[in-house]
Amino acid sequence: MGFILKNTSGLVNTRFTDAARQKLSQGKFNISYFQIGDSEVLYNTLPSTYSQVSTMILEPGFNAQNSSGTPESNKQNVKYPFYVDGTGGNTYGIPYMDSVVSPIYNTAAIRGFFSGDTSILPTSWSALTGNEHLITSNYVIDMSDLTGGTSIRITNLSCNPVQYSQPSIGDVITIYYDKLGGTNCGCINLPTPTPTASQYSTPTPTPSVTPDPNAPCASPTPTPTPSSTYCPNPTPTPLKTDCVMSMSSCYPMLTYRIVNICGNLITLDRPTPDYSNITFAGCYGRVLIYPKQMVGFYDSSTPLAHYSDDVINFESVCGVDEFNVKIWNMNIPWSENLAGLDSAVYKDYTQFGSVNYLGTKEYLGYMSNSGQTFYLNNTFSAETTNTYYYNSFDEVVKVEPEEQKAIAIIHYTNQTIDLFYGEKFALEPYDPSAPYDTTGQARNFKLHIPWLMWHKNPECCYGETFWVDPPDFDEYDLFQPHYMQSKKNVDMNSPGLRYYNLWDTNPTLSGYQSRIGKVFPDDRMIVIDDEELIAAMSYKSNRNWTLPATKLFLSTPNTCNTIGDSVGVLTGSNETMFVTYRFTNTSAFTNSLHCNYYSKITGPNNVCNPSDSENVGVRFGGDLGCLKTYNDTFKSGFFAEKIEIICQKVVTGSRPNSDDWRIIDMTDQISGSTVDGYITQNALTGTTFVITKDLYDAAANPTYDLGDYLELTPEGNTSVQLNFGDEYYFYGSLETDIEATIYEMRYKINLSKTEFQATTNPTWTSTAKPYITEIGLYDDEKNLMIVSKMQSPVLRQGIQQFLVKFDF
């Protein structure tokens, strides 16, 4: 114990005693009495000219009372208390409880893989390519060399001269197929960041100029020459550097796993696109290589790396963490197989990555229908789901928990010991009266996915930012708290598990915004439940674009199509058809996952006319702005040569079987509307596709096999091949304000003019002015719970009030 330093310490210094912490652990903590004292004042030795304010006061002790037993016990109460009345009798007063709740707000540093000035919309994004975000950004590939195989030949441009690490088997590799890799290769130092809670916060760079995506391909500078040191893996200590790469989301950006390396030849877990018909020279794609796992690069295996060597000495209470984790985690648990996945041939969802997060999927209300209801508002207070999307005709499609195939859980899980995100996300309403002081408001929460071609965005090329409280949409009341309530434990339901919906800012023709997930502020977690966005975020899906949901309707046989059977494919309301579709290429580009929205329709209610049956009509209403035609100038977007309908008829109320889907090629129905053999949005929106009984029956053998389009992981495979659910980081960035709540224990010590005038201090006489040096707060058994010491003795005079505060 030392002495209280004058001028730099608080006027009142307070500590919980050891006895108080013991009582707190036993649930017996209470405050019932107080004493004031002058135990460290000497009245009768020094001359009257001496100022008692100069007296040194001991710090309050952690063990001012210790009741753990011999030899640790100690009792250091107020040695010389004041009498309440007169010069004898009781020395205990009654304190007045006046607790206060105080929320505090701050802004967390933006964390993730991308940076840009998000105050400017659309934001000009750059990928962070420094040593703290990836293994190496030094390589490019010649896109004209890609013929749809699994091997790529990388060329070292030394984009970042202080990156020495080499790619290794098992690493994750993202290829930007934007043809700009040769000119967009270099290290740009970011400006000095504004200080935040961490010394290594992610800075925001000056917005970089994105090259014109329609410009001809340019040769890289310098001309790439193969590096001679690919196989060795030297590992010098990397230098800290922050570099950025300007980017555009207009092009495919696909992520793979490295399964083999020999020289500068890298083998990937699945084929690349076929760009062999590119006629321009110098079309290069940038290659960014990320670590195979979180631990060992972004995070440590134990918390020890976050401590300084002498932190457990009760001195280093500030700036403890030696580094922060600069990215967010992401896990995508699947609870059913994808359409076309035969579990007898390929690893099924029970062997996907992230299967150990399925319990969270159930807890958050995305598995069973019977576990919860969703309180949405006063009108809809007991909905079974609050997950929905809009098809391309602006019709709302609800997804019940039992229908939810997968969710993407974005969380911040690591060994760091600092609470970089406080106790929760700060989501306060927007205050138009204070536009320049928005800290703590929900409008500051932004989930950025700069590489995404989002089907609801007509511009297609700027990525997407999702909001809890999107600006300029106040009249729609999108920012509202919702609650998930338990059907099994009603004590949870006042009000329930709080969440907010996550929205885009691209209104449909009817003015609706698309919700894509939920934000759970108290868990500091985001859940993406839009199944098409989940598909784009899944590396194995082989696409960074999303697809719209179709509209289904019942069609009387031979009405839209006069050729075919007069019996419809659905014979009654006991039959339901699930429908999705895929875009397929056979001569160029690449193949990817089918649309992950499953539309469904139930057969006719033909009680009166049992012989009536219906076909199923399929319509596209748009939302395909990123669907382009392929030509030598290599425009943006994605391409397709075929449209194939994937469908399955089931007993109403049941789910489809993954290996019983049927695939029907409908391309011939729009062949007159294609451009150079490629499908266009106009061709799709101008055609009504009809699933007839004849077409459905003819597709019975063989059924749809997803393995014909994607490199699925075979059953029994033990290699490093990438599978669904293997994602471990969120490839985006997150901005949010954060909040902590201070619960302040406040006890008012009120001293009236006539009370506490005399002290038990033996050196005091009635002719001397008494001084106060300490206050003790006691429980109902008069155990010392809290001790407060004054920085300097305080003269006892008139009516006084002391406020003893302790924060939690």
Image (spheres, helix red, strand yellow):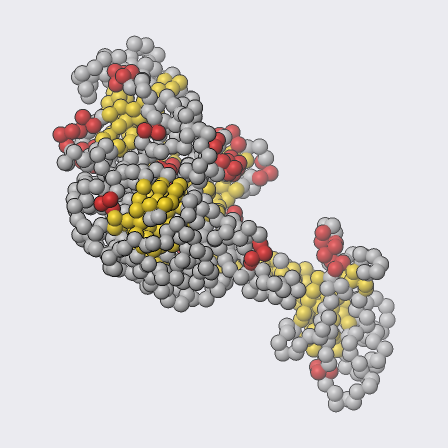
Give the position of the N terminus as an image quadrant: bottom right
**Which residue is at 59% across, 35% downward?**
489
Tally of marks: 0
Q: Is residue 414 visible?
A: yes
Residue 478, position in %: x, y?
Answer: 39, 46
Residue 19, position in %: x, y?
Answer: 76, 58
Front residue of 131/214: it is 131
Apparent side of residue 259 relative to residue 71 in the rendered image (left or right)? left
**Which residue is at 80% across, 82% downward?**
43
Q: Quadrant of residue 760?
A: bottom right
Residue 317, position in %: x, y?
Answer: 61, 64
Q: Quadrant of residue 269?
A: top left
Q: Is residue 526 visible?
A: no
Q: Is residue 91 above or below residue 472?
A: below
Apparent side of residue 43 relative to residue 512 in the rendered image (left or right)? right
Q: Is residue 573 above or below residue 528?
A: above
**Which residue is at 21% across, 15% downward?**
564
Residue 12, position in %: x, y?
Answer: 67, 71
**Which residue is at 72% across, 69% downward?**
60
Give the position of the C terminus as an image quadrant: bottom right
Front residue of 779/135: it is 135
